[in-house]
Amino acid sequence: MIIMNNSIISSLQRMIDVNTPIIYIHDYDFVRIDELIRQVVANKKVFEWNPATGITNFHTKAMQGNGNMQSLESFLENKYNEDGETVKEKYLVLKEIQDYIDEPKIKTLLLLMSQRRLYDREYDTTIIIVSSVLRVPQEIEKYVSFLEIDYPDEEEINRLIDEHIEVNFYDKNKFKEEDREKLMPSLKGMTAFEIDRMLDMAMSSNGSLSAEDTEMILRQKKQMVKKSGLLELIDTPENLNSIGGMDALKKYLTNKAQVIKQIAEARRYGVAIPKGVFIVGMPGCGKSLCAKASAALFESPLLKLDMGSMMGKYVGESEANLRKAIRIAEAAAPCILWIDEIEKGFSGVGGDNDTMTRMFGYFLSWMQDKKSSVYVIATANNADALPPELKRKGRFDEIFCVNLPNEEERKAIFKVHLEKKERRACVKDSSIDYTALSKSTNGFNGADIESVVNEAIEKSFLEGAKGLQTQQIVDIAHKTVSISKSCQKQIENMKKAFADNSFKDATTGNITNNKL
Ligand code: ATP
């Protein structure tokens, strides 16, 4: 038996009570959604239409109309034109209508029925669309409310586990409390349907259910991430040693990683769950590098969220994509969610871009209420383009700004790139003067330094030299157009923005503007 979470039942009930003309449930678990509808509408009149069987008895699933399938259009037309007794409280459950909803007649009928529902007190028809694909034409958007189905909580997951043990005649005594505790985090953040499948797979692989199945479940979850197309699972060899400079930021991330790695103990001790860090800074100065290195530091998967891929062409699609991406990240927790160039994603906030503003609002409230061990690392270039709400405390734990590297940091960056394993041959007999290198690269960013090193090594190789010399690198540096020269104005503006705002300096840990 499917047991529904009480909060979802009351959410649906509330939507009906406030006369919502169209309720949209974006889900593919029809059995579960039917149960939800059944529990809310009890023994009221419910009519179902779906593309496979047309008008269908909602309760028995028997096709209506003596084998003649009625089209969605004529079904809606009939229901719209009803009068008298027949208009009393009833529900139309429209399943998988995404391929029909854009047709002019369907759109118009849905619009007319919504308006009649609002203006005609007698006409008490609620439309419930249940669809695995989210598609809402702009014309009816105003009349639609989306019902979000929460992932099962611990109580429900436990019930699903118990059900599986019973159905499979598995010896209850073999399934220990430790098994349950170990399996629980891996089953969180999935739909009941997905949890069912995972438990089936675990049972069928070795006829038992135990903590050992956790690994298989986590592997399957990674697949889910890949399939979504909204997030990228980044596999990277970077670690903290790949970063030159930014000592304060590195120390900060190291502390947060410690907390996340022992989250249960930290929670018990009263430590606040780390939410995430916002890194703004000059281009090519190692922001992405920090995000990548965090994967090794936190010993967690790194999921990159591309704001561009969130944008859909249908109403509500972009928000649904963002919600889905966040739910997947929660499913993969503990993990790092890296949002690159966040300012580009939220650039239209506050203007007339409603979609962007709604997405931004959703993101902020998720950050504010976040209880999961998804650690967010957001990176951005332009500090001025950020909406102020994003900078407020309570969303990110801290905002760091990354400036062009100072003399000591440039030394460290040269070391990182010259002392890489694969470079040992060309620098082994050289005594590199790192101070001289650093002095010749004032105004360079990390990417500039990396390119100077690459060029010097290539030149030295082509000239048949035995090893790389300091002077060769300095000569190349002198001929290099650094970021400070190629983007002089932008760099000056950024420096000013950092000084005007109150950020933590990634190098020193000091506040950039203490007067604010
Ligand atoms: P953008 O804002 O343009 O995306 P970014 O700040 O994210 O830039 P990265 O992509 O992290 O910059 O850096 C580009 C390359 O420059 C890196 O692959 C790395 O090799 C080198 N680099 C930059 N900063 C550092 C650093 N502090 N230490 C070592 N290498 C660095």
Image (cartoon, rainbow, N blue to C red):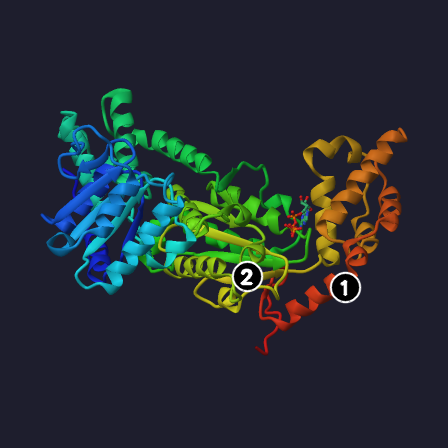
Q: Is residue 332 left or right of residue 84?
A: right
Q: Would you say the residues marked 1 and 2 are in contact, meaning their CB atoms lie under 8 Å apart?
A: no
Residue type at mark 2: give it.
Gly
Q: Amino acid at mark 1?
A: Lys
What residue does disc 2 label? 348
The circle drawn on residue 489 is 1
Give residue 370's position: percent from left, percent from top. 38, 56
Question: Horizontally, is 43 left or right of 485 in the view?
Answer: left
Q: Residue at x 62, y 44 (%)?
A: 241
> Compared with residue 250, is residue 301 higher up or lower down, i.e. above or below?
above
Residue 393 screen position, x and y as percent? 46, 67
Q: Position of residue 231 (x, y in %)?
A: 49, 42
The quadrant in which residue 347 appears is: bottom right
In which quadrant will I find the N terminus? top left
* Residue nearest the observer in this picture, 295 or 90: 90
**Taking the image as drawn, is residue 333 in sight?**
no
- Along the line of sight, the residue nearer the viewer: 214 or 83: 83
Residue 318 in the image, given as x and y percentages of width and height: 46, 50
